[in-house]
Amino acid sequence: MNTYWRTFKTAAWLGWEMDSNWTEPWLFMVYSVVKPVAGAFILVLMYTVFAIIGNRQDPAAFSYMYVGNSFFIFVASVLFGTFQVIQSDREWYQTMRYVYIAPISYYVYILGRAVSKIAVAAFAVLITLVFGALFLGVQMHISLEAVPLFVASTALGLAVLLAIGICLGGISFLTAKHTHGLAEGIPGIFYVFCGVLFPLSVLPGWGQAIGRAIPLTYWFDITRRLLAPTLGVNTTLTGYSDSVILLLLLVSSVGFFGLSVLVFKAGEYFARKAGKIDMTTSY
Amino acid sequence: MSAATARRTDWRYRINLNLHAVVGRSYPRIVGANREPSWIFFEAFLPLLGIAAYVFIYQAFGDRAIAAILGGTCGDHACADAAERDAFIALAKSNTNSLIASVVLGGTMVAFWLNVLWSMASQLYWEKEIGNLQLYMMAPMNRMALLGGMAVGGMVMTSMRAVSTLIAGIFVFGVVFQVANPLLLIAVFFATLIALYGLGMMFASLYLLWGREAWNLSALMEEPIFFSSGFYFPLGGLLRIPGWGPAVAIAGSFIPASLGLDALRQLTLGTTAFGGKFWIFDVTTELEILILMCIVFLILARYCLAYLETLAKREGKLTSRHQ
């Protein structure tokens, strides 16, 4: 256990240094905020254009979309923060072979490396939400009693995300340098099917079924219920109580943890067998 | 004059050499992509999902607008009669189609922009990191031929994703494009691509100097550029935001994709789309600006490359990794 903790701590420190020490702290802070805020502004403009053309305001739909998009920052950062470790160590820094043969758990090392991304993402989510509430009229108000439930659901949501990220890491042992395809594509699945920006009811039946099978759908739903309870947008998930959703998230995070260990080990095994552990694909 | 010197100063030899360099550098990109089947899934199919999300946003807005009209609200007032209601529903559907088409065209351009950032601008820095740059620098061809090869390979490689996005837009999302002037459309498209890749060539040289900041700079030029250049909405929407809107739109217009997209949208949706409210300039003016950008960026790329190569050599950074 001591080795795991030491690996985790050192990897977290390494990840933080790699992410942040290329520039001054203030510039890193600006950099960390500009990207997600610009992402939110794309949606603001999409809404504005539609409102101008249709001569119709829809603040509930806007708030729904804005809150969902803010929490989606976690999805993109945590997933990227985990699976990119393998490709950056393998292709970019070419240090994979040295880290891999060290007497540590590579799984724990990846988790540690992802921590700095989670910290930066949390900061960006906070800034985006505050900005939306103060300047864009996003309808948000969380009650004091809802805070523990919010913290618990966020922790479970992040656990699910980390596990999914590790699964992707296991797969990327075997693939060429597809970091950008993965970074765009996998979050894209959740962006479309998890009711992040629009209610599930917009999707066709099969799309709704996929959405309901992904635990993150419930995470986004409970987050919005707690942060913006008065929106009145039909999410098609009203039949699920808060406690049922929390239980679902708990079961999912345990399930996905098991799956992540399995996929990671399988990816590792096949990559070693095929001699791909330190492969570089520099075209 | 020695035989070698005579050969180096021979124009035919030099053109031939540089064309070979273009083909040689584009070859691994085109062939490498084809030899890696997972590429299609990761680079062509998966990114479609992100674009689909933006399509569904407009779809959701459209559905809610139509539901409100059916509920008796036409815009900001109550519907006077069934005829007004039907007219508003037709308008809402047409606007939704135009906005979805804007997203599809934007998604096509996103593919090229990402390729410019990650496979052009960052490439020389990347080559330095993996040790290829010194080999390129020792080779006798012009460095612009090297960058040209990277651009050609990148365009071909990215075309698959761009075409997939267009096909998905037409067949999956049911977008209707009305192309009245295909020749002008092709001219605008290629002028946009050349200007974009010219910008990428210029960045490639600058990134060589900036070192490790390069990766972060590329990452920073994703969402903020998608926003300021109107990849997912008509850029004219920014001009309607009082205060900061026009400033952001003007800044975003320095990226060739902004005006290119505006012109492509006019050519495929008609100038009357969105009530004609959101266009920046007419298509001909935008094409002229794009051609000017092509020339300026390619010249700047040439000078930046020469200057920064000298500077990097002088400061000893040309082959030092992880800086």
Image (cartoon, rainbow, N blue to C red):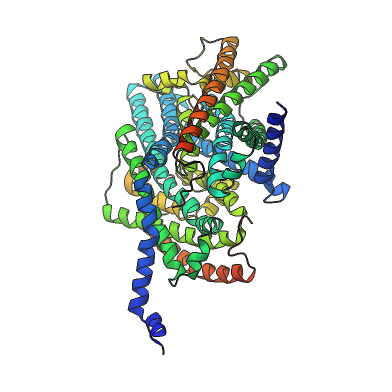
Kindly identify the residue that appears in the image at 33 percent across and 49 percent down.
Answer: B267
Q: Percent position (x, y) of residue A45?
A: 52, 39
Between residue B184 and residue A161, name the one nearer to us.
A161
- Quadrant that contains the C terminus of chain B: bottom right
Q: Percent position (x, y) of residue A244?
A: 57, 10
Kindly identify the residue that appears in the image at 57 percent across and 40 percent down.
Answer: A85
Q: Percent position (x, y) of residue B62?
A: 41, 28
- Quadrant that contains the N terminus of chain B: bottom left
Q: Tell me if residue A132 comes above or below residue A230 in the rendering.
A: below
Between residue B179 and residue B37, name the one nearer to us.
B37
The answer to whether B71 appears left or right of A21 in the picture is left
The answer to whether B274 appears left or right of A42 in the picture is left
Between residue A236 and residue B250, name the one nearer to us.
A236
The answer to whether A133 appears left or right of B45 in the picture is right
Q: Percent position (x, y) of residue B12?
A: 33, 78
Q: Tell me if residue B46 comes above or below residue A94 in the rendering.
A: above
In this view, the residue farthest toward the bottom is B1
Among the 4 quarters of the image, the one containing residue B206: bottom right
Q: Can the viewer see residue B190 in this picture?
A: yes
Q: Tell me if residue A270 comes above or below residue B80 in the rendering.
A: below
Looking at the rendered structure, the number of numbered marks drawn on it comes to 0
